Image (cartoon, grey):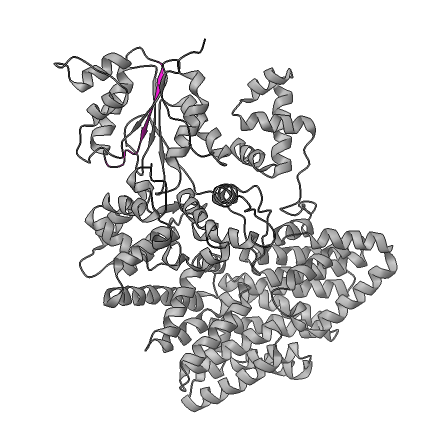
Amino acid sequence: MTTRRVGRLPDDLTSFVGRRGAITQVKRLLSTSRLVTLTGVAGVGKSRLATRVSRDLRRAFPDGIWLVELGEVPARGDFAQALVSGLGLHGEQTASAEDVLAEHLADKRMLIVLDGCEHLLDGCGPLVGWLLASAPELRVLVTSRAPLAIAGEQVWSVPPMLTPRLDHQGRVVQRAVGHEALELFANRASAVLPTFTIGPDNEADVVRLCQQLDGLPLAIELAAVWMRSLSVSEVLARLTDRYRLLTSGDRSAAPHHQSLRAAIEWSYGLCSPVEQAVWARLSVFADGFELEAAEAVCVGDGVTVEDVFVGVAGLVEKSVLVREDRQDSRTRYRLLRTIREYGRERLGGGTEELVLRRRHRDHFLLLAEQLDAQWLGPDQGEWLSRLRLDRENLRAALKFCCTEPGEADEALRMAAALRFYWIAGTSLREGISWLGEALQASPEPSAQRARALLVAALVSGWQGDCDAALDLLAEAQGVANQVRADAVLALVPHTAGTIDMVRHHHGPARARFTEALEQLDALRHDGLAVLSMSALAVLQVFEGELPRAVELCHRCQEICEEHGDQWVRSWCELVLGLARWQQGEHDAAVSHLHRCLRIKHQFGDVLGALLAVEVESWVASAQGWAARSAQLSAAVGRLWQPIGSYLYGVRRYLAWHAENEERLRNVLPAGELRAAQRRGAECTVDELVQFALGERSPAPRADAPVRLTPREREVARLVAQGLSNRQIAEQLVISKRTSDSHIEHIMAKLGVTSRAQIAVWVAEQP
């Protein structure tokens, strides 16, 4: 005899992939709240997640789980009557739908899933609130692109699916197999092409495809259908018009779930005219942005500051705009690529788009010039952090300048103004590339061209490309003399000194840096001029003039203290570390190098941090810690390789490095040396810095298997099932304290901070 299933929850026609952590989180919310609303952008998988969670909870609701699909109900339809029909109720004709619902639900222990409420919020919110007050055992799970905004509601935003990262060479940084976005693609692709698998030949392309589709399940499923007739790389190449490509969806689904365009248009139609206008204008941003930037770009031609503020708030509420979670006080927002491209399409090109792109360029040009003017001050780290967050917008602004007729002079201004971003932000190659494009776009002699040439010479020198740097320096001087750009000429000595130092021409370099220090106005206002002091001190260390180098560094630090400068101060600490090492004061050397390293790492100055670690490896060798020295130096060698010329190409640094390598080969047995070098080569920059500072042993690579004990794996699986610590203890017949201890150990080994992250890890295991 079979028991009739109570409720209305249809079975899935396709398998549910991934989302273990999300399932656990939503279950936890439903255990503590009677109303949970799943929000999120169109196509993110709210409906599938809600039905999957509901299916897992069937035993908890003896009166059933009832799915009420609201997508087909008209925007001004009778929500109460739709709910009556969805629950299969038939009341007396004289009774209102509200009374029928209240009477039926009063004593029921039931879960109602309201799928797709975003167009019915005015009617849905009040009625759900009233029903929850009338039926104490009722629970409601809602999917909507905006919250109901009633008392007691727990809102959980469904995130896009996770994808692996690619490094700067396009290689997969982490294991692709096991990531839910790729699992979904492989599952759906194999349904139309049974021989499809993800392997070394297509792994990177699948990752790129899932990234381009923002990890949205609907878009991934629609793309997978094309595996019947195209390769992954061919689909990727055709994503320039994703709305035309991603159309062949499930014909049994609601119309706004059958294609990517229909899903996004449904969201667009729910927006007010102001929100629609702001959505279209925000599409000129290449990535995230702050409210201040949105106002600078979007205000004008009938759109006010108030409109932008209200529009941004409304778009966040409707899950069109993503509010990024950040630790600092500056709120940022972001349009997913899919949403941004639809907005750009609505913008329609032409004069309006050109005006908005110019405003976008103007805002980020102003930001770059503010950084340049205010660099010699206490806010250097904050400036670099802001520009890194806006790097895609900076690139878009530079591209606009270089490709749009009549904008080339602004390209020179912007590329040159970003000099500290290129150098201190470890973006040397990108800086040289953009400076080259800007110089090619604006070949006429001008003060802006002279300045851009000089910055290009300096960046090339930092990268170790001395031939290019000398040619650029000569042209910069010629143009500056021709147009009488005295401010540019004042900075020539520092640039020339930097190039001479890299060329191992120490005498001319000292003369140039000494000349730079005579430019008193530049010394008071320009961060690079101050850097001449620490550069001159380095040369004094190279020549063995250690007391003079130490004295010059102390003078430089006084200037840094006066201005609040940290970046040049970090170079002084590096030079002091070198000097103390040469003097045999190893503990003092390490103290200086660690102060340098902390500043460099805070700034994201990767090359400066790596140089400090390399010097520390020489100190460690002198202290007798050969294995540590080998590990540090091997990590520096691997991490520096893709960025620029090793150790800036400075011969003295390279000679010290070679001497240390020879010493290590003589001290360490070959097997120990290889083991230490292998450990170092597996470090990330963050892991290396922590190891150098003594904060931790170097962690394994991100894709290295995590080794949990059999008991810890058992506990992790129970965590993923949503069990509490006490429930786990009862099931495994152990004390709660032992259960707590196991979970602490699991979190430490996995490097996670929440139970949901443990659940995600469990889901990724084969």
Quadrant in which residue 365 is drawn: bottom left
Q: Residue furthest bottom?
A: 482
Relative to 706, say whether 729 is above or below. above
Residue 26 falls inside the magenta stretch: no
Q: Residue furthest left?
A: 94
Q: Position of residue 326 (x, y in %)?
A: 44, 46
Which is nearer the eye, 362 or 588?
362
The answer to whether residue 741 is above or below residue 674 is above
Report the side of 568 relative to 542 (left or right).
left
Image spot of residue 375 (x, y percent): 47, 65
User: Can the viewer see residue 602 in this picture?
Assistant: yes
Q: Taking the image as drawn, is residue 292 in sight?
A: no
Q: Residue furthest top?
A: 1
509 w.r.t. 300: above or below: below
**Between 183 and 146, which is closer to the camera in this rendering?**
183
Vertical relation: 352 (above or below) 310: below
Point out the image quarter for the N terminus.
top left
In this orientation, which residue lies closer to the viewer: 109 or 408?
109
Task: Please give left or right for residue 346 compared with residue 436 in the image.
Answer: left
Tell me if residue 112 is in the magenta stretch.
yes
- Counting the numbered discs, the total is 0
Q: Position of residue 568 (x, y in %)?
A: 56, 65
Viewer-proximal residue, 684 or 24? Answer: 24
- Magenta region: 109-119
Q: Which residue is depicted at the point 42% across and 64% down?
A: 394
From the image, which quarter does the C terminus lie in?
Answer: top right
Q: What residue appears at the point 73 percent right and 58 percent down from the top-left corner?
A: 634
| Lateral position of residue 642 relative to residue 338, left or right | right
Please state the horizontal and vertical placement of residue 15, each as a whole percent of the image. 47, 34
Classify residue 91 by image quadrant: top left
